[in-house]
């Protein structure tokens, strides 16, 4: 049985983030569910007003996704190097990403129940799950490496009472 490593979880998070960034653009070209969401909130708006709001929502989703990609690459790089700060970086990025995803899931502005369609808010949580897994796995890997690390040379013997 193969176990997942923190870097595997981070690569999964990177792939999910890239997918989350591309899905709104694909939707814009096909089903256009974001425009339907805007029309449901503003039935009296003209097609050009709906298009402006749809474009703003789509741009927001794409930009947030694109900003997540360098964050994942940064965390992967530090983890690969074995940086002692990789856990702190991953934890900070996880917290920031989760706050942003929860904001997208819950932000409401009249007459919207939610500004982002629910499906996009939920989709934005997927990279957060990979981020949580990465943080937990980094913590376990760090603990395991400390437990198996040899004592520094010239260290005073430990005293057990």
Image: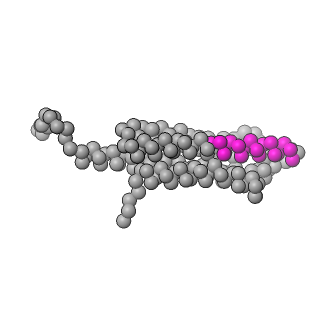
User: Viewer-proximal residue, 79 or 46?
Assistant: 79
Would you identify the image quadrant in which residue 100 lies?
top right
Quarter of the image with the N terminus in it: bottom left
Q: In the rendering, at what x and y percent does residue 38 appear?
A: 78, 47
In the rendered structure, the answer to whether residue 28 lies left or right of residue 73 reads: right
Left or right of 79? Residue 58 is right
Residue under the point 39% across and 50% down = 137
Quarter of the picture holding the C terminus: top left
Residue 82 image offset from top left, x and y in percent: 36, 43
63 in the magenta segment: yes
Instruction: Measuring from the top left, give residue 123's x and y in whole percent.
Output: 61, 52
Please name the predominant secondary structure of the magenta segment in the image: helix
Q: Kindly identify the residue that appears in the image at 24 percent across and 45 percent down.
A: 149
Residue at image location 49% in from the left, 52% down from the top: 11
**Viewer-side residue, 66 vs 137:** 66
Asked whether residue 87 appears in the rendered view, the answer is no
- Determine whether 88 is above or below 54 in the image: above
The residue under the point 66% across, 53% down is 23
Q: Is residue 156 above or below residue 12?
A: above
Q: Quadrant of residue 114?
A: top right
Q: What segment carries the magenta color?
A: 47-64
């Amino acid at each position: 049985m193969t176990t997942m490593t923190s870097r595997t979880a981070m690569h999964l998070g990177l792939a999910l983030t890239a997918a989350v960034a591309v899905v709104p653009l694909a939707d814009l070209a096909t089903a256009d569910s974001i425009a339907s969401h805007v029309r449901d909130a503003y039935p009296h708006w003209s097609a050009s007003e709906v298009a402006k709001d749809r474009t703003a929502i789509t741009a927001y989703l794409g930009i947030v996704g694109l900003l997540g990609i360098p964050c994942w690459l940064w965390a992967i790089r530090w983890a690969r190097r074995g940086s002692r700060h990789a856990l702190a970086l991953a934890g900070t990025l996880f917290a920031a990403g989760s706050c942003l995803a929860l904001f997208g899931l819950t932000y409401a502005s009249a007459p919207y129940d939610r500004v982002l369609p629910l499906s996009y808010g939920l989709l934005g949580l997927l990279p957060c799950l990979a981020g949580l897994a990465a943080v937990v796995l980094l913590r376990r890997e760090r603990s395991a490496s400390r437990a198996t690390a040899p004592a520094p040379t010239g260290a005073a013997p430990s005293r057990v009472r």
